[in-house]
Image (cartoon, grey):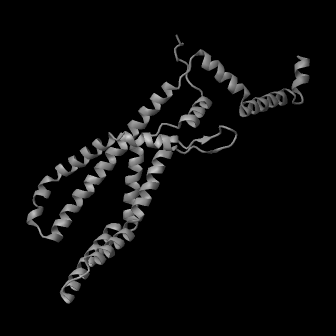
Amino acid sequence: MSEERTIDAGPRRLERLRERHGAPVRAAPCAIGAIVGGLAAAWAFGVPGRLLDEVSEGLRSAGHAGLAVGGIDGASEVRSVVGAVAAACWPVPVAALAGAWLGAAVQGGGRWSSVRGGRRPAVPTAASLGGAMVRAAWGVGMAGAAAAAVWAHWPAIAALPALGLGAGLARAAPVVTDALLAAVGAGIAVAAVDVAAARLRWRAAARMDTAEAREERRLEDGHPEVRAQRRAAARRTVARFAQPGKESHGIAA
């Protein structure tokens, strides 16, 4: 029977485990990073306004061409509108991907890996990212928060059919904004809890038994950085006791 794993893992053991298996990466921060990145890009590049302009311009041009010629090439018009929409929307998926990667990388806490000699940023691995995307329970919390925000605005929503297009859009804008803010806020809260729980479980799983602790101490003793730190500490101790006056004071005493 194996011994109980009650000895906490040291920092170098945790680092080696991250190198071998990847750090625990949860889905919620990746999704929140993607959402925030996409929304920021949409706001910075004015994507909603550009989309409305492109679609309305495409519909107007199609209508004018149909009235003038009595028929239009529908495929070419659709291709034109799709190309314009893609040109207007491209910053959103790019920023969403960058936000998802940042949401995964920030879970490392800004660590720098020093295993195998070199130092490099501890970025998430493909395996850890793939496993994270399977766990998507955070979506329920985000959807629930958005639904609660919409429910709070239900009287305004019920009055929308009686309004004109401009007044309806103006009345719907606060509803959409509140729903987005509620969803993002709930996602951030779920992400924080999810990451904290995953780290606690991961550290508990990384605990060692007595034999593993002895092996860890052996690896620690032979690690170049540990040996360099011990040599530096020994030099400081020798230099402190070799200062002039201290030795003679000790002899006189």
**Which of 182 and 77 lies nearest the eye of the viewer?**
77
**Which of 127 and 246 lies nearest the eye of the viewer?**
127
Q: Is residue 39 above or below residue 196?
A: below
Instruction: Please identify the residue farthest to the left as the structure is shown.
Output: 162
Residue at coordinates 20% horizontally, 61% vertically from top-left? 172
**Measured from the top left, where is residue 129 in percent x and y?**
46, 43
**Measured from the top left, where is residue 217 in percent x and y?**
67, 22
Q: Is residue 179 above or below residue 234?
A: below
Residue at coordinates 23% horizontally, 62% vertically from top-left? 173
Answer whether residue 53 is visible to the viewer in this image. Answer: no
Q: Is residue 182 above or below residue 235?
A: below
**Which of 224 and 20 lies nearest the eye of the viewer?**
20
**Measured from the top left, where is residue 233 in percent x and y?**
77, 30
**Measured from the top left, where is residue 8 in percent x and y?**
55, 22
Q: Is residue 170 above or below residue 101?
A: below
Looking at the image, residue 224 sits to the left or right of residue 173; the answer is right
In the rendered image, which quarter contains the C terminus? Answer: top right
- Quarter-of-image position of residue 174: bottom left
- Quarter-of-image position of residue 241: top right
Looking at the image, residue 45 sits to the left or right of residue 59; the answer is right
